[in-house]
Amino acid sequence: MIRSLSKIACATLLAVAPMTLSAQDHAAPAADAHATQAAHAPAAEGPVDIITPHITDGRHIEYPWFNSHLAREFELPQLAPINIGGYEVDISPTKHVVFMALAALIVAIVLITAANVSRRQHQQHGRSKGFAGAIEAMALYLRNEVVLPNVGHHGEGFVPFALTMFFFILVMNLLGMLPWGATATGNISVTATLAIITAIVVEIAGIRANGIGYLSTIFYWNKDLPLVMRIVMFVVMSPVEMVGKLSKPFALAVRLFANMTAGHIVLLALIGLVFTFQSWAIAPVPVLMATAISMLELFVAFLQAFIFTLLASVFIGQIREAHH
């Protein structure tokens, strides 16, 4: 178990290698000058959007500062794009990239520390306790009750992957609940990447477990039917099988993205009622409702990480047992 925790931490550090593609043309100098003047022009009075900037990606990070706005912005460095195959690959860090890297660092530090402390406690007392014991209990529960029962026999090799996904997604979800934080899992590109990685692991697991029988998960060929019906069912069901393969990572990506985004929209919309009505008299009601939503969001942060891990384990187990 301790060795698995160390593997999870190392794998998480490798999980953050995000790059974004951009095909933006360079604007003319006159347009740049116009844009600079517009940026320095005083903002028009009116409603201020407090929801969209919190749930979307950006080129800056907010940090607490005790002034009239209670925050300042730190502009992230802009790196020169790399040209690959006619496309400009923008490798500049963004807000969500930074929080993904921060989540990976936190997972690595927490799990490596917990593994080392747990090892010492087992040697001294025969059991782990405290924070290390809590982390070990969580990992053991996921391993014994979620991963192994679903991935099937000889599924120990999938435990580090599943636990990596759980802790990595969990920390990203929790970072989004900080006042100046950002929810990287509220970005469809992030959740889609996690889903694609999971889909690759699922398909490789199917190939290793079934060999040539893996083709039956793509091309439907029922040997119990007469030849004519086999051909008919092959033509009809093979596209359905392929759609089923594509729908699984799609569902993983959209479920995580939608749940994390919706919670923040509801929370910020409730807080926005105070500014919409511009009255302190109604402030207690939105604040109490926002507090209740925040408690629900804390539960959802754990729940969505758990569901992603559970479904990934189920998909791996299904394809490994496809030959039966």
Image: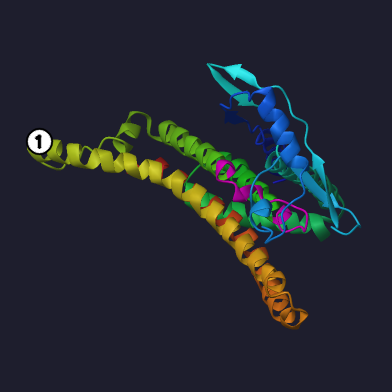
Which scheme is used to colour this image of the protein? rainbow
Quick one: 131 or 306, which is closer to the camera?
306
Residue 232 placement, left or right of 17: left
Quick one: 91 or 269, which is closer to the camera?
269
Of the 4 image quadrants, the one containing the C terminus is: top left
Q: Which residues are magenta?
A: 174-190
Does the segment drawn in magenta span residue 182? yes
The amino acid marked with disc number 1 is: Leu
Q: Is residue 225 above or below residue 305?
A: above
Q: Quadrant of residue 266?
A: bottom right
Residue 86 placement, left or right of 13: left
User: Could you say where residue 254 lies in the image, as x and y percent from the top left?
Assistant: 49, 50
Q: Quadrant of residue 140?
A: bottom right
Q: What element does badge 1 sit on?
A: helix
User: Could you say where residue 296 lies in the image, as x and y percent from the top left?
Assistant: 64, 69
User: Could you say where residue 301 lies in the image, as x and y percent from the top left?
Assistant: 64, 59
- Residue beneath the point at 63% across and 42% down: 160
Res 78 visible: yes
Q: What residue did someone put label 1 on?
A: 227
- Residue beneath the point at 19% across and 41% down: 236
Callout 1: few (<14), some (14-19), or many (20+) C-alpha neighbours within 10 Å?
A: few
- Residue beneath the point at 65% across and 47% down: 184
- Residue beneath the point at 15% across and 42% down: 224
